[in-house]
Amino acid sequence: MVKNSFISVISQKEDNPGSVEFQVFCFTNKIRKLTSHLELHKKDYLSQKGLRKILGKRQRLLAYLSKKNRVRYKELIGQLNIREIKTR
């Protein structure tokens, strides 16, 4: 579980809970928890809806960070091991 140990390191280092990186980190944790929950409970439609909302919020935050600071964005998606967002 390299991901979990690395994520705990990020949360300990982060001093500003309002920063974009910290918010994306929190949303990523929620997404991973909900995904594992939905693997067991396939018909939990309310959780599916919540997962889609969180995914949208994280996508908007990542798009904002991508526009404002491309270096921090690349660093963050590399650390959290998530895919790059599609650009239109």
Image (cartoon, helix red, strand yellow):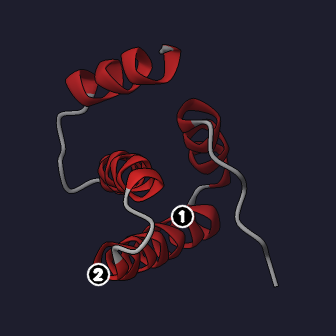
Tell me if residue 69 comes above or below residue 46 in the rendering: above
The residue pinned by badge 1 equals 62
Mark 2 surroundings: few (<14), some (14-19) or many (≥20) residues within 10 A = few
Which of the two marks, 1 or 2, is nearer to us in this view? 2
Residue found 65% across the figure and 35% down from its top = 78
> Could you tell me if the residues under marks 1 and 2 are in contact, i.e. CB atoms within 8 Å?
no
Q: Residue at x 25, y 32 (%)?
A: 14
Residue 83 image point, x, y percent: 70, 51
| Mark 2: amino acid | Leu
Q: Residue at horizontal 56%, vertical 31%? A: 79
- Residue 25 relative to residue 85: left or right: left
Dividing the picture into quadrants, the one containing residue 71 is: top right
- In the displayed structure, would residue 85 be above or below residue 46? above
Q: Callout 1 environment at 10 Å: few (<14), some (14 to 19), or many (20+)?
A: many
Residue carrying label 2: 46
Left or right relative to 67: residue 3 = left
Q: x and y percent of residue 85 in the render?
A: 70, 65
Residue closest to the eye, 1 or 69: 1
